[in-house]
Amino acid sequence: MTELLFENKTFEKVDFSIKKFAKAEYDNCTFIDCIFSNSDLSNCSFIECEFVTCNLSLSNLKNTSLKDVAFKGCKLLGIHFNNCDDFLLAMNFEKCYLNLTSFYKLKLKGMKFSDCKLIEVDFVETNLTNAVFNNCDLSDTTFEHTILKNADFRNSYNYLIDPEINRIEKAKFSIDGLTGLLFKYKIVVE
């Protein structure tokens, strides 16, 4: 079977929740204002692709390759990124809604989240070394046995991170974020 390949192609305003998405390798492609909600994107490969103001909520990403993929202004609700192919997995998110997503046990070193809503996200046993969370809402997000070495949370808020069960060496936090590190002690920081 010949594998489909799309290179340097722009897909604009396509509703893939109605039109079937082709199982293929997408190299340096751009998706603008496309709808992928509840779509099957399994076994596809995205290399140096960009998704701009797309809705990918509840998409199936089983065995999907995401290599140097940028998501900008996208809705990615309820996605299990932990089902992706983890070989060379690299993504960045800007102004995205990632509520109820899972990054369980992934190696996401250097990942960048900027101006994102990350509500009820699963980062359990995830390696977020050198990750940057810039102006992100992390309400009810779970960090358990997570590697946060050198991670930057200085501009983010609503996080609860237990230093006793997470590796936070040299992670950066603001003074305002201290309550998110000391929550379990029920102390008051003024």
Image (spheres, grey):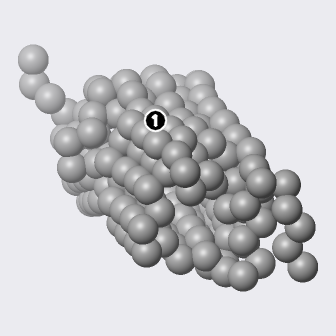
In depth, the one of 190 and 57 nearer the eye is 190
- Residue corresponding to mark 1: 104
Vertical placement of 181 versus 85: above or below?
A: below
Residue at the image point whose x is 54% and y is 41% from the top: 144
In depth, the one of 149 and 34 nearer the eye is 149
> Residue 176, image x and y in percent?
77, 78
Q: Quadrant of the C terminus?
A: bottom right
The quadrant where residue 154 appears = bottom right
Residue at the image point whose x is 35% and y is 33% from the top: 84
Residue at the image point whose x is 72% and y is 61% from the top: 182
Count the marks.
1
> Residue 52, image x and y in percent?
54, 60
Q: Secondary structure at mark 1?
A: loop
Whether residue 35 is visible here, answered yes or no, is: no
The type of residue carrying mark 1 is: Tyr
Direction from residue 79 to residue 169 in the image, left or right: left
> Residue 62, image x and y in percent?
37, 25
Direction from residue 188 to residue 13 in the image, left or right: left
Vertical placement of 179 versus 99: above or below?
A: below
Direction from residue 137 to residue 89 in the image, left or right: left
The quadrant where residue 189 appears = bottom right
Whether residue 116 is visible here, answered yes or no, is: yes
Badge 1: how crowded within 10 Å, few (<14), some, or many (20+)? many
In depth, the one of 100 and 17 nearer the eye is 100
Residue at the image point whose x is 67% and y is 80% from the top: 174
Q: Quadrant of the N terminus?
A: top left
Vertical placement of 108 versus 157: above or below?
A: above
> Residue 77, image x and y in percent?
65, 39
The quadrant where residue 35 appears = top right
